[in-house]
Image (cartoon, helix red, strand yellow):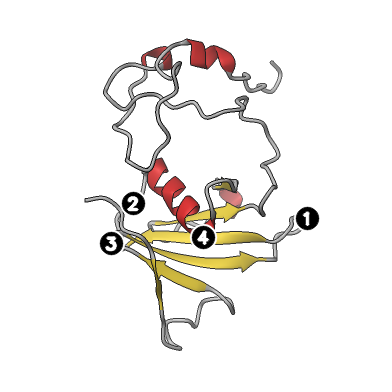
Amino acid sequence: MGLRPFELVELNEKGRRYLLPGAKVWANNRYQVVEEEANHLHGFAPVVHLSIKRLDKKPIRSWRDLLWIKNELCGPERWAVEIFPAMAELVDTANQYHLWVLPEGMRAGFDLGNTKPVVAAGDGSTGPGQSRQQPLPAWYPEPTADGDSDKVAATLVPFARPGG
């Protein structure tokens, strides 16, 4: 079953006790998302913090589901980041995931190396480096003409490695 649109959830006072003022809670058939403005990040413009968990409390490891949630709640042309902190600052208490969505027009501080979408067909065929792609959801962009070839890998800017 696909993902249904989110609906705003009204919480009572007890349910809101850990939320920042102005926070919104959204839910659909699979996820609950708390959306709040995060003004406390030093040196950053205010961002939207999305705290995401599955209703059944299982882990999420669908990158596309997280992308869909970001697109649905904040817009398809905004950048978001997920942070993997230093172990000394680790907080890992639940199957809950966090995206920080940048303000409209702001990009992440690094370049992904492409200037247009690159999407491999989700038909089980091989992509760059003989990788395989899962089936594409209906809301996803159409595969690009070069999405199934090693040419895609050659168009991306390699990441610089320390000392390399």
Residue 59 disc label: 2
**Dot 2 and dot 3 residues touching (CB under 8 Å):** no
Relative depth, front residue between 92 and 80: 80
Question: In this picture, is 31 found above or below 142?
Answer: below
Question: In this picture, is 51 found above or below 1?
Answer: below
Disc 1 and disc 4: Cα gap in Å? 19 Å
Residue 50 disc label: 4
Question: In this picture, is 153 found above or below 26?
Answer: above
In the rendered structure, the answer to whether residue 6 lies left or right of residue 109 reads: left
| Disc 1: which residue | 43
**Residue at left 78%, top 55%?**
43
As shown in the figure, which amino acid type bears the numbered disc 2? Answer: Pro
Q: Residues within 10 Å of mark 1 (few under 14, many from 20)?
A: few
- Quadrant of the image occupied by residue 12: bottom left
Residue 25 disc label: none
Disc 2 and disc 3: Cα gap in Å? 15 Å
**Residue at left 69%, top 66%?**
39
As shown in the figure, which amino acid type bears the numbered disc 4? Answer: Leu
| Disc 3: which residue | 29
**Dot 3 and dot 1 residues touching (CB under 8 Å):** no
Q: Specify whether residue 159 is in view.
A: yes
Relative depth, front residue between 144 and 87: 144
| Front position among marks 3 and 1 | 3
Disc 4 and disc 2: Cα gap in Å? 16 Å
Q: Earlier in the sequence, mark 2 or mark 1?
A: 1
| Front position among marks 2 and 3 | 3
